Image: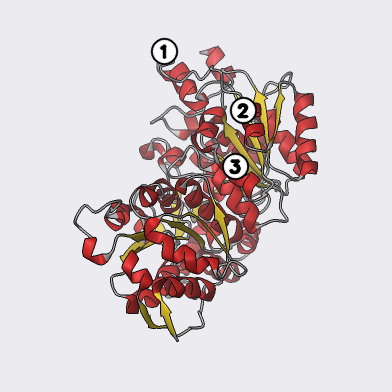
Amino acid sequence: MQLNGSEIVIECLKEQGVDTVFGYPGGAILNVYDALYQHSNEIRHILTSHEQGAAHAADGYARATGKVGVCLATSGPGATNLVTGIATAYMDSIPIVAITCNVGVALLGKDSFQEIDIAGITMPITKHNFIVKDVEKLAETIRKAFRIARTGRPGPVLIDIPKDITAKETEYIPEKIDFPERKTESITEKALEQAVRMIEESKKPYIFVGGGAILSGASRELMDFVNKVDAPVTDSLMGKGAFPGTDSRYTGMIGMHGTKTANYGVSECDLLITVGARFDDRVTGDTKKFAMNAKILQIDIDPAEMNKNIIIDHGIIGDLKEVLKRLNTKLTQQKHPEWMAKIADYQKQYPLKYEDSRLTGPYIVGEIYRCTKGEAIIATEVGQHQMWAAQYYKFREPRTLLTSGGLGTMGYGLGASLGAKVGCPEKTVVNIAGDGCFRMNMNEIATAVRHQIPVIQVVINNHVLGMVRQWQDLFYHQHYSQTILNDAVDFVKFAEAMGAEGIRVTTKEEFSEAFTKAMELRKPIVIDCQIDQDDKVWPMVAPGAAIDEAFDEMDLSKS
C-alpha cells in the first residue's frame, strides 16, 4: 500500500508493539503528529512539559516494563533537549528509540531555521543513529533501530527524519517482527568449565550483581546460582532488585556509599564473581586496592567491559541469563559455613543506622517501604536521597528501582516515574527527590495532572544541594559555595498551582499520615519533607580511597 513517511513511522511503531510514546511537537515533526492523530486509539501520546521530560519518561517506561521506550521531538532545540535523556539511557544501557524530525533534505547543512546536526551531536551517546534521506528506506531503518536498541547490550538509538521525507510517499509492506534471540554464540564450554573450577576451588566467594542481571531477566537463574555457590551477595546501584534485598545472603550495596559488610567482604574474599556489572569507579574506589585478595570472574554480554576498569582472571561473554543457566547445570553444591558466618557477623557488627528521633531521609525511605510493603516502583533523582533510597528500601524484584546510575542526572526521576506509571498502571510509583533535583524538572507535575498520572512525588527538602554540601563539609573545609537553597520557593503552593495536591511535613508522624493519604488519593501529589541541612549519607568512602576504608560518623568522632 502507498503511505507517506509519517504514516510509515506510525505503522512501524505499531509493528513493534509500541502502545505509548512521549513527546513534544513542533514544526518539523508536524506531519508525524498529524499521522499520530489518526491512530490515537492505538498509540497513546503523553505530552510532556519539556522534551527532556519525554526522554526520561521513555527511559522510565523502558526500565519498568522491559520494552523499548519511544520519545518524539522536533528539530533544533527540540532535538537537543533530548540529549541529556539519551545520554542517561546510554550510560545505563536502557533501550529507547528517539525519533526527531529535521529541516528538509535540501536545507540540511545550510544553517536553516531550527536546523541542528542531531545525529552528529548524539553519536557518542547512542548505540547507533540514522538520518533517513530516502523515504523508501524509512521502514527498514525504523525496524533496524528497534532491533539495535533491544539486541545484546541494550541502549538508545536515534532516527532523524527530514520533514520532506515525512511527506513523500512510497510502497509500505507490513512485516511481522521477530524479536532477537539471546546472545549465546560466544559462550564456550571451555569458558564455562574454567569458571566452574574457579568457583569450586574458592573458599571465600562473593557475588557482585550489576544492572545486566536485570536487563537480561536473570533473577531466577541468579537465585539458583547464589544457592549453589553458597556465597554472600552485594550489588551496584543499577543491580538493585535482581537479587532480593530481603534475602539473608544479601549484604547491601558495594562502593562509595555501600555497607561496611559488603566493602569489607569483597576486600577479603578469594573469588569475586561479577555478574552484569562494569566496575564503575563509585564501586571500586582505588582500583589498585580493589578486591586485592581475590581472583575475579566476570560475566558480561559486552566484551568491551572485560579488563576495562579492573584486570580480571577469567571472563565469560554472553547473555547473563543463559550463562547462569548453563553454569547451574555444571556446578556441584558448594558449602562455605565459616565464610558465611563471618559475613553474618559483619552484618551484626556494621548495620545501617540513622538518627531516629526526628524526620530524616532514611526514615522517610523506610516508611515508604513499610507503607508500600516493598511492592512499589521507586524512581529517584541524584544525590543523598538517591543513596538513602538504595540503602533503606529493600528492593525484592527487578525493574523496581529507576535511577540514573552512570550519568547521575539530576531531574531524571519525575519524568521516569511518569513513564513507569504509564507502563505499569497497577503499581504504586514514587519519585524520591531532593529539593535541588526537583527544581530542575518539576514542571512535569503539570504533565502528571494533565494526563491524570497518579505519581507520588516525595521531596526530601534540606534547603541545600545535600550531596555536594556533604563533600564540602568533609573535603572542602566547609566552604559552602553555591549550595544553599534557603530561598522562598514553596513546593506546596507550586503543586497546587499545577493542579496537584501539596502537603508539607516536618515530623515523622506527619509524613506517615501524608504518605498514607497519598496512596489513597490516587492523584498526583507532592509531599514536601523538611529535614536538617547537615544530615549525611553513611557510610562513605572518600574519593580515590580503597573501599575497605569506609567510614561513618562514629569513625570521624574517634579520629
The amino acid type of the residue labelled 1 equals His
Closer-to-camera residue (371/83)? 83
| 3D distance between C-alphas at marks 2 and 3 | 13 Å
For mark 2, give the secondary structure. helix
The amino acid type of the residue labelled 3 equals Ala
Q: Position of residue 96 (x, y in %)?
A: 47, 59
Which residue corresponds to mark 3? 446
Compared across the picture, whether 421 is left or right of 156 comes to: right
Q: Residues within 10 Å of mark 2 (few under 14, many from 20)?
A: many
For mark 3, give the secondary structure. helix
Q: Earlier in the sequence, mark 3 or mark 1?
A: 3
Which residue corresponds to mark 2? 491
Residue 66, above or below 428 = below
Compared across the picture, whether 43 is left or right of 191 comes to: right
The amino acid type of the residue labelled 2 equals Phe
Asked whether the residues under the numbered discs 3 and 1 touch, taking CB atoms below 8 Å apart as contact, a structural biologist would say no
Which residue corresponds to mark 1? 477
